[in-house]
């Protein structure tokens, strides 16, 4: 990994609410990068310089492994580009905003035509702002939509995308009254707003909402209120914004004990209900719905990654593959403005390791997701991920 004074290279179960700090980062306020040109001109017959910004050098546990996994995934994608040449240059941000801004400027001075990364929203926002006046776009690994716009696009899975997929599926299955249950954390507040908006767009009334203190005692105290309101409103579904890292295991254990049974009320998760794998055996999650990337493509990526690097990819490593795949697909078209906004936001989108995705003009993204259900402690896809976007040219 690049250090400050180096030249770029070319080339167990967590405790309750262990992710509250990370979730809060998703909702942090940030100044959006200033407006800029659409993107640089490139020579599609020569290797395209791409900067990859990773959090190596950080003191955060796991960041070194994350950085290596992102680089590995990017290089795996480069091997799949069928003739398109990428000159990948890796820069270390140490997970720090000031460092990210500095290396972003350095990357552009070194010739980078597009920046892939960083991971954390503050660093991504700083990197985008630092190069906004230099006509270079940033494809960040963040899922914080507050930093999207201008020259910054976020590649991470968005609450709004998941909520829209699940709300539309619920409507198609005849659900007509959905109750929202959420912890009072910044991250879950973003999720709650996404669910509420998705239900409205799907034409399903939100029958009510209960928020609870983000603690085990807070869940226990909220259970009677949730149970009473679900019954009194005649709700046929409950949409949870909490995940298995936080309150969800307690909610799905205590609600059935208070008469709200998943066999009678449809449980829907905003997060991945199958992570960790031990969650699949929870009685309260049997029959629950959730969204996930195209399983066949994701499994293929994980298998190939393990064969190449001897370990499993980090959960977000696929975003680096997606970024390189999108860049390669655009360069292959042979247009000198391939990495301009018009190319990045082409309506037909791209195919990555998690399925189809496309970048939107406002800097956010849309992904084709499957809907799964937990049945007999196993994940069963009950509505496959789409293979093309409506109105796109298909894949």
Image (spheres, rainbow, N blue to C red):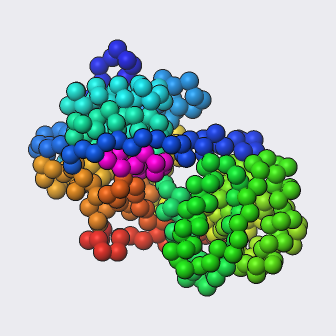
Residue 234, image x, y percentages: 76, 81
Residue 299 shown left or right of residue 379 in the figure: left
The reply to whether residue 13 is in sight is no
Image side of residue 150 versus residue 254, left or right: left
Name, please, the residue furthest toward the bottom.
174
Residue drawn at x 70%, y 52% as measured from the top left? 184
Q: Nearer the viewer, residue 356 or 105?
A: 105
Residue lying farthest to the top in this orientation? 5
How many callouts does the rendering have?
0
Quarter of the image that includes the N terminus: top left
Counting from the top left corner in percent of width and height, residue 45 is at: 11, 44
| Quarter that holds the C terminus | bottom left
Q: Is residue 346 visible?
A: yes
Above or below 232: residue 35: above
Q: Report whether 99 appears left or right of 19.
A: left
Q: Is residue 12 above or below residue 251?
A: above
* Residue 282 image position (x, y, % from top left): 77, 60
Quadrant of residue 343 within the rendered picture: bottom left
Magenta region: 143-155
Q: Is residue 146 magenta?
A: yes
Q: Residue at x 38, y 60 (%)?
A: 357
**In magenta segment, residue 271:** no
Q: Residue at x 44, y 34 (%)?
A: 123
Instruction: State the image quarter where residue 124 is shown.
Output: top left
Tell me if 3 is positioned left or right of 268 in this view: left
Q: Nearer the viewer, residue 189 or 176?
A: 189
Q: Residue at x 33, y 17 (%)?
A: 6
Which image quarter: residue 130?
top left
At which x and y percent is residue 388? 35, 70
């Amino acid at each position: 990994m690049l250090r400050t004074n180096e030249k770029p290279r070319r080339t167990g179960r967590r405790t309750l609410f262990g992710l509250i700090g990370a979730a809060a980062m998703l909702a942090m306020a940030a100044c959006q990068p200033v407006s800029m040109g659409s993107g640089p001109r490139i020579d599609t017959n020569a290797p395209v310089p791409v900067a990859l910004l990773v959090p190596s050098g950080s003191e955060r546990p796991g960041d070194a492994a994350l950085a290596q996994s992102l680089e590995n995934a990017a290089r795996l994608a480069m091997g799949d580009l069928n003739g398109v040449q990428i000159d990948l240059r890796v820069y270390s941000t140490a997970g720090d905003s000031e460092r990210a801004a500095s290396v972003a400027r350095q990357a552009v001075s070194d010739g980078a035509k597009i920046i892939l990364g960083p991971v954390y929203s503050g660093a991504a926002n700083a990197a985008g702002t630092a190069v906004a006046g230099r006509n270079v776009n940033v494809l960040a690994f963040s899922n914080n939509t507050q930093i999207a716009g201008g020259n910054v696009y976020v590649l991470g899975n968005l609450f709004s995308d998941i909520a829209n997929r699940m709300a539309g599926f619920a409507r198609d299955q005849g659900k007509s009254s959905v109750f929202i249950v959420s912890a009072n954390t910044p991250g879950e507040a973003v999720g709650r707003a996404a669910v509420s908006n998705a239900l409205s767009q799907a034409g399903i009334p939100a029958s009510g909402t209960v928020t609870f203190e983000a603690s085990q005692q807070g869940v226990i105290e909220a259970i009677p209120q949730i149970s009473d309101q679900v019954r009194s409103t005649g709700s046929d579904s409950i949409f949870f914004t909490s995940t298995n890292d936080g309150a969800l295991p307690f909610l799905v254990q205590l609600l059935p004990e208070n008469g709200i049974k998943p066999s009678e009320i449809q449980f829907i998760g905003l997060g991945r209900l199958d992570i960790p794998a031990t969650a699949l055996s929870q009685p309260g999650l049997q029959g629950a719905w959730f969204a996930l990337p195209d399983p066949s493509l994701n499994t293929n990526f994980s298998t190939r990654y393990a064969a190449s690097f001897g370990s499993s990819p980090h959960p977000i490593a696929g975003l680096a593959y997606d970024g390189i795949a999108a860049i390669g697909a655009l360069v292959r078209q042979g247009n000198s403005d391939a990495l301009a906004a018009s190319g990045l936001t082409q309506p037909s989108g791209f195919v990555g390791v998690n399925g189809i995705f496309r970048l939107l003009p406002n800097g956010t993204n849309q992904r084709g997701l499957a809907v799964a259900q937990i049945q007999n402690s196993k994940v069963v896809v009950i509505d496959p991920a789409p293979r093309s976007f409506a109105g796109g040219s298909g894949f």
